[in-house]
Image (cartoon, grey):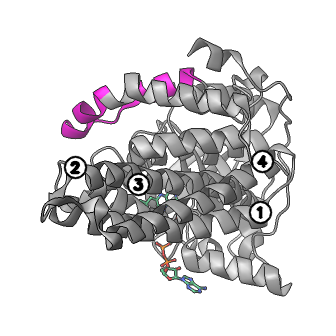
Amino acid sequence: MNFDLSMENIQIRGMVRDFIAKEIQPNLKYYEENRLFPKPIFQKMGKAGFFGACFPERFGGSELGFLNLTIIAEEISKAHPSLGYAFNMQAMTCPFTILNWGTEEQILKYVPDLIKADKIGMFALTESGGGSDPAGSMKTTARLDGDEYVLNGSKAWITFANEADVGVLFAKTDVNAGHNGISAFIIETDRSGFTANPLEISALGYMTRSCDVFLEDYRIPKENLLGKEGEGFKIAMNALDYGRLTVSSRLVGIAQGCIDESLKYCHERVVSGKPIGEYQMIQHLIADMVVETDGARLLSYRSGYLKDKGEAATRQSSYAKYFASEVAAKVTRSALEIFGGNGISDDYPIMKYVNYANMLHFGEGSANIQRILIANDALGLKNANRHHISRRFSLSSDLTKEAVKES
Ligand SMILES: Cc1cc2nc3c(=O)[nH]c(=O)nc-3n(C[C@H](O)[C@H](O)[C@H](O)COP(=O)(O)OP(=O)(O)OC[C@H]3O[C@@H](n4cnc5c(N)ncnc54)[C@H](O)[C@@H]3O)c2cc1C
């Protein structure tokens, strides 16, 4: 067993840090203050190969693999947790689901543009009736009419639906068949009948937008069915399984961001004649923050490492997501304590980290849902998301790719 990152992993992490310092940090304020979607930043990330990390070169991917994906996601989320949200849409839930389940034509038509961020992606599963039980709450329907499907219904909380060009969306093709009546579709948002209304939620910050989505007699060619009719639930659970990998590393990025800020603050902030880092109770907080974040990172790396070996790592991704969400909640709370009143000031990024740590508690299955999956697995009971499906395309073993060298 070897816990060291390889030279290649370290080089990639350094390259991502340089990219963030040069391309992201100087521009973030402009997009935040003007409430603009940072598409040019996305496109630069796409060109650098970040979104294409787990995609074969022949579809425009950089073939860096899943472990490197966790490293990239952590750094991006640390830079700004809002960009981490976008990262999942652009690297995983939308294009990776098309890669895993699409035909060669579908992959060639959508994936290269998505992972370069020339097109923006979304993943639309949740409905207002409850995200924890997507099959039970799903009211959106799809009816075959000649060569087209006609979709009607609505979706809730869909990240960047107002900016998206393409999405993976789930609807019932058979309302009487439970899980087996759900199908997945690749939708194009410029067709009539599609509306996305961004929600005004201050906790999200300016760059992330969640939207209500409405489909009214929305028509799509039948070639846009993803997988087979009735396979939608399996596709959704498989997509969330891969999504959990990056959600855990994004939570680690949030926790690490808080640690970095807290360490600086502990040296700078002098109270009663001493830097606060010299007070033992503050040191206890720091010790817990550092150790627990490291544990969450190791769990996240492990699921990336196992996926690189071709294993499904469903259980391990659930462990990583669950533990990282608990750690990020605790670490952000500790950072608030260290910063005192300044923790909520806009001069420091702590509240951003707090908000996103809390939001990510729900993403890709809430903490309770992870507990259910993990306990069922330990008890040998049936798990709803146990679809041990490996990815369809293996990546080459020579992982240092042109995209990295160029950056
Ligand atoms: C910022 C943000 C962005 C999002 N982006 C997307 C997106 O792009 N695409 C998308 O499809 N969805 C998205 N979501 C939705 C997200 O996936 C859901 O919020 C999540 O699945 C939880 O669903 P819910 O909010 O409806 O909570 P509910 O399902 O109503 O659950 C409420 C509470 O009850 C608990 N609970 C539910 N069932 C059980 C049970 N059986 N046992 C014990 N406890 C239970 C849950 O853990 C939770 O604590 C986003 C959400 C947020 C907040």
Q: Amino acid at mark 2?
A: Glu
Q: Of callouts 3 and 4, which one flags the residue occurring earlier in the amino acid sequence? A: 3
Horizontal side of residue 368 vs 20, given as left or right: right
Q: Which mark is residue 305?
A: 4
**Residue that badge 1 annotates:** 314
Which mark is in front, 3 or 4?
3
Q: Residue 15: x percent and y percent?
A: 55, 25
Q: Is residue 46 magenta?
A: yes
What secondary structure predominates along the stretch shown in magenta? Answer: helix
Mark 4: give few (<14), some (14-19) or many (20+) Cα within 10 Å. some
Q: Of callouts 1 and 3, which one flags the residue occurring earlier in the amino acid sequence? A: 3
Q: Secondary structure at mark 1?
A: helix
Residue farthest along the front direction in this orientation = 273
Q: Residue at x 44, y 45 (%)?
A: 78
**Residue that badge 3 annotates:** 259
State the extent of the magenta-drawn residues as a range: 26-48
Q: Secondary structure at mark 4?
A: helix
**Residue that badge 2 annotates:** 268
Which mark is in front, 3 or 2?
2
Q: Residue at x 22, y 49 (%)?
A: 268
The answer to whether the residues at label 1 and label 2 have Cβ atoms under 8 Å apart is: no
Q: Of callouts 3 and 2, which one flags the residue occurring earlier in the amino acid sequence? A: 3
Q: Amino acid at mark 3?
A: Ile
The answer to whether the residues at label 4 and label 2 have Cβ atoms under 8 Å apart is: no
Which mark is in front, 1 or 2?
2
Q: Amino acid at mark 1?
A: Thr
Q: Residue at x 81, y 31 (%)?
A: 104
